[in-house]
């Protein structure tokens, strides 16, 4: 309820502007993003209060590694809302987006899918299960994976050190300690350019 009230407040505050509503999440958070966006549109939260003059605002869920939320009836209900969209980023080796699965009647409701495969990254150890569902690895994949048959190239200046924040997946030639995002960050220091590096100094 708090989310709906806040979005309604923001809609009123920016009623004279061209706006849209985007909700994003990873894993269970992505599933909640789907439910949240459906709730907004079903309750006309995306419709300006003075709706006679303005069209409903588009609402989009951007999901990373979302488990399946509903069945085919839910998917049909989702698709029935013209202003509602869902983009699902899926990492090929990650099984979470395939669960609970069709045997239990669950399906993916996404209106568009962005496939990535972190196994193609030359920065990460291949076939490492720690990369499959990790959000930082997902974002790394989005920044560089160009699809089947194409080379992986970071087209977004996303720091590769971020993939090792809570796991150990970065190849040894990159001097980034594993699980560094802890107290003192294992001497990893964020520079003025926004990139992290090892501050390996000697007294």
Image: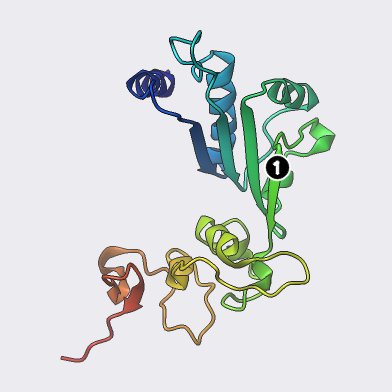
Q: Quadrant of the C terminus?
A: bottom left
Q: Residue 42: x, y in percent?
A: 59, 15
**Residue 107's quadrant in the figure?**
top right
Q: Along the line of sight, which residue is nearer the eye, 145 or 69?
A: 145
The N terminus appears in which quarter of the rendering?
A: top left
Q: Nearer the viewer, residue 173 or 156?
A: 156
**Residue 172 drawn above or below residue 52:** below
Identity of the residue drawn at 69% across and 75% down: 151
- Furthest residue toward bottom: 202
- In the displayed structure, does residue 84 sit left or right of residue 148? left
Residue 200 appears left or right of 173: left
Label 1 sits on a secondary structure element that is strand
Q: Position of residue 99 (x, y in %)?
A: 72, 42
Q: Position of residue 168 (x, y in %)?
A: 50, 72
Q: Residue at x 61, y 78 (%)?
A: 122
Quadrant of residue 39 within the rendered picture: top right
Tally of marks? 1
Residue at image position (47%, 83%) is 174
Q: Is residue 85 above or below residue 165?
A: above
Q: Position of residue 55 (x, y in %)?
A: 54, 18
Along the viewing direction, whichever of 182 and 82 lies nearer the viewer: 82
Residue pushed farthest left? Answer: 203
Counting other residues with Cα less than 10 Å from the Cα at mark 1, is it few (<14), some (14-19), or many (20 or more)?
A: few
Describe residue 165's horizontal placement relative to residue 184 as left or right.
right
Q: Quadrant of residue 192?
A: bottom left
Residue that badge 1 annotates: 112
């Amino acid at each position: 309820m708090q989310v709906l009230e806040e979005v309604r407040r923001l809609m009123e505050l920016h009623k004279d502007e061209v706006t849209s509503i985007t909700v994003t999440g990873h894993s269970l958070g992505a599933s909640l993003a789907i439910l949240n966006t459906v709730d907004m549109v079903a309750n006309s939260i995306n419709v300006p209060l003075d709706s006679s003059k303005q069209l409903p605002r588009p609402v989009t869920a951007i999901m990373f590694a979302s488990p399946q939320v509903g069945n085919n009836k839910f998917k049909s209900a989702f698709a029935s809302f013209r202003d509602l969209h869902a983009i699902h980023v899926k990492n090929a080796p990650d099984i979470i987006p395939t669960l609970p699965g069709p045997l239990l009647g669950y399906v993916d409701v996404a209106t568009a899918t962005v496939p990535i495969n972190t196994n193609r990254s030359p920065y990460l150890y291949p076939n490492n299960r720690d990369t499959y569902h990790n959000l930082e690895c997902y974002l790394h994949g989005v920044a560089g994976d160009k699809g089947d048959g194409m080379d992986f190239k970071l087209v977004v200046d996303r720091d590769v050190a971020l993939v090792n924040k809570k796991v150990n997946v970065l190849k040894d030639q990159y001097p980034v300690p594993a699980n560094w995002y802890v107290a003192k960050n294992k001497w990893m220091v964020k520079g003025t350019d926004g990139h992290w590096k090892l501050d390996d100094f000697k007294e």
